[in-house]
Amino acid sequence: MIEFNHVNKVYDNGAVALQDVTLHVDKGEFVLVCGPSGAGKSTFIKLLSHEILPESGTVMVNDMDITRLKKRKIPYLRRRLGIVFQDFRLLPNKTVFENVAFALEVIEEKPSVIKKKVSHVLELVGLAHKANDLPEDLSGGEQQRVAIARAIVNNPLVLIADEPTGNLDPNTSRDIVDLFKQINNAGTTVVMVTHDMDIVSYLDKRVIAIEEGRVVSDRMRGAEYRED
Amino acid sequence: MKIRTFRYFVKEAVKSMRRNGLMTIASISTVALSLFILGIFTCGVVNLDNLASNLESQVEVSVYLQDNLTTPEIMDVGKKLKVMPGLTKMEFVSKQEALQRFEQRLGDQKDMLQALDGNNPLPNAYVLTFETPEQVKDTAATVTKFKGVDSVHYGQDVVEQIFKITQIIRIGGIILIVFLACATLFIISNTIRLTVFARRKEIAIMKYVGATNGFIRWPFLLEGVILGFIGAAIASACVWEFYLFVTGEVQNSLAFLPIVPIVPFFYKLAGGLFAVGILVGAVGSAISIKQYMKV
């Protein structure tokens, strides 16, 4: 599903973000990427969503080398990725329903299909009763649920989450993580970047640790992983 | 593009025009002002061109005689004129007749002639008509040298003057229009920049969920085009009123000037103004989109 082959990324200011990173994520896996801030976790996600390109190496998504992707094909790659951010990134003047529907509107989906799909995912994340609320009327956890609904409404190949619990309290974080687990159980590959050790041990899934741009460990059981 | 999508674009464009109220008004005003001036200059040039070609196609030559000639001398000049090549008609207009014709032409304003105190400043003249305008020019050159001939007047004379004036107006107009076009582009691209800024969050999200660049750009492009369109509409209406007013005034005081009728000339002009307005709007927003929206 996802393959990094000897990926190197150096930013314009000379900072080395990733060094010779090689890793492999299978379809249906739930993978945590962790490490201290500045270790290159965000770079990892930006490479996946084709916001930036590596200096060398290849990034494969679904057997397609996205580093060679033509510029006008990028949107079609992103339609197959669901991305969730730490700061939710909801549109404040749109309702919960409209925020989720937005992801389908911009890809010119039929209104009837939009209605059906959005109702379905809102049900899934447990927010069907708040469909007409504005984001400002929701708690942080609920806002993140809306963001997750928006990320999965288009049935992505991979759900990518960049510190999705970073702005949430521990209890809410676990609820959100449970939701990711539920989505993963339904068959969607999940890649989650986090530096929250509670989450890592709670989930007990595969953990890829990145430090100073290198993969320093890759274990199948998160509960065994300790940052040291 | 689907109709539903297009409706969405229009809605977004109108929304941001409202949000940027003042800049929207400023943009529309500059577009309108620039196009109005472009329109006025075009009207001027078109009318002068029309006047020139009107005069150019005249095949008449007025040969004015010196005032102190005796009747036989006048007849003498007439005999020499009669053999000019290409001549189809020759008419003698005496001082008195010329004055009467002038009086008629003045119409309501013939009271002006009282200022002459009974003096008649008009000369005796022969009016010659030729087959083609070209023959007029050759003949005029020869006839000027005849004894007893004071001066020779024909279309070409005036035409050359008019061409000079038209040229000046054209060049001046083009310089002014270029300046105004730059100002308009600047204002429109600034307006669109505000829109892009106001919607930067939305744009980022659109990119993440896989909207194509075209889809993201359209509302901004459309906003520019609408600004240009409204500006052009205002400019056209103003040019219409202005043209009717000025031509009305001209016809009252200078009835003999040929004026290009407003229809169908105005349709072409308005079409041009709309085309320029829409183009400037589109280019203005394209500049901003390129600069401020890395999609």
Image (tube, coloured by chain):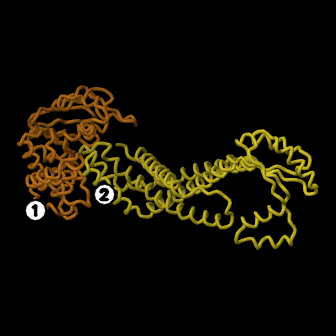
Chain colours: A orange, B yellow
Mark 1 crowdedness (10 Å alpha carbons): few <14, some 14-19, many ≥20: few
Quadrant in the picture for the N terminus of chain B:
top left
Mark 2 crowdedness (10 Å alpha carbons): few <14, some 14-19, many ≥20: some
Q: Name the residue at 21% across, 49% down.
A: A103
Q: Which residue is mark 2?
A: B11
Q: Secondary structure at mark 2?
A: helix
Q: Which residue is mark 1?
A: A129
Q: Is residue B101 above or below residue B269?
A: below
Residue B93 location in percent, x, y? Answer: 81, 57
Q: Name the residue at 20% across, 57% down.
A: A98
Dot in front, 2 or 1? 2
Measured in 3D between alpha carbons, the distance from the residue under mark 2 to the one under mark 1, in whole angstroms, is: 28 Å
Residue B235 location in percent, x, y? Answer: 50, 59
B87 on left or right of B183: right
The answer to which of B145 and A206 lies nearer the viewer is: B145
The type of residue carrying mark 1 is: His
Find residue A101 and name its label. none
Chain under numbered label 2: B
The type of residue carrying mark 2 is: Lys
The answer to which of A134 and A55 lies nearer the viewer is: A134
Q: Secondary structure at mark 1?
A: helix
Chain under numbered label 1: A
Q: Is residue B193 above or below residue B295?
A: below
Q: Is residue B159 above or below residue A222?
A: below
Q: Name the residue at 78% across, 49% down.
A: B90
Residue A90 location in percent, x, y? Answer: 24, 55
A70 on left or right of A101: right
Quadrant in the picture for the C terminus of chain B:
top left
Residue B104 location in percent, x, y? Answer: 73, 66
A85 on left or right of B127: left
User: Does the rendering let one see residue B198?
Assistant: yes
| Residues at discs 2 and 1 both on one chain | no
